[in-house]
Image (spheres, rainbow, N blue to C red):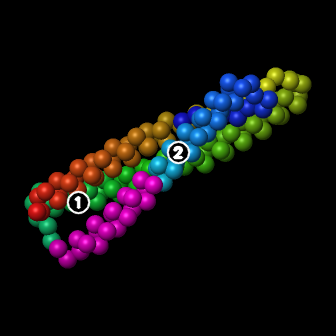
Amino acid sequence: MLAFITIYMDNDFQELVQLSEKRNEKSYAWLRYLILLASGALSVLVSLQSGKPQVGLAALCLKAAWGTLGLGILLASVSLFGEIWIAREMVKQFVEEKKRRLSSDDKTPLRIVVRTPHALYWSERLAYLSLIVALFSLVTFAILTT
């Protein structure tokens, strides 16, 4: 994800900034929603399975679902840190740029572009993959136990 900040922006760049901010808000809201769903599913699955021993492939699918749900929650949470990281990085770059401008008397429009680190980008992709694997594991478990 990218985040932008520009002082004295031209219209095209300002529109790009607004679209980028809107996309980031929607993306992070979606991740929060997925974390909420996965946490609820994991809680219900664990509480409903206590006392009911499973064997064979069904038990393997259930344990895989638990593990991948937990991993998906963890990875999505790491990815959500990107929201905080971007805001902090934008402030840091803004302060550095303002300090530089004070010493150079530069009057051009101030543009700051922040790119999310690769680790946060990949944690989001791996969170999606983990939650998809959990879904398939749960469906397989349901088919095997009915």
**Residue 3 placement: quadrant:** top right
Residue 14 appears in the picture as rendered: yes
> What residue is rendered at 45% in x and 55% in y?
33
In the depicted view, which residue is nearer to us: 3 or 79? 3
The quadrant of the rendering that contains the C terminus is bottom left
The local crowd at label 1, few if under 14, some if 14 to 19, many if 20 or more residues have their Cα within 10 Å, is some
**Residue type indicated by callout 2:** Lys
Q: Position of residue 144 (x, y in %)?
A: 11, 58
Q: Position of residue 15 (x, y in %)?
A: 66, 30
- Magenta-drawn segment: 33-52
Magenta segment, prevailing SS (helix, strand or loop): helix
On the image, numbered disc 1 is attached to which residue?
63
Q: Position of residue 122 (x, y in %)?
A: 43, 39
Element class at badge 2:
helix
> What residue is rendered at 20% in x and 54% in y?
139
- Closest to the camera, between mark 1 and mark 2, is 2
Residue 3 appears in the picture as rendered: no
Marking on residue 26: 2
> What residue is rendered at 66% in x and 40% in y?
89
In-image side of 31 versus 18 (left or right): left
Element class at badge 1:
helix
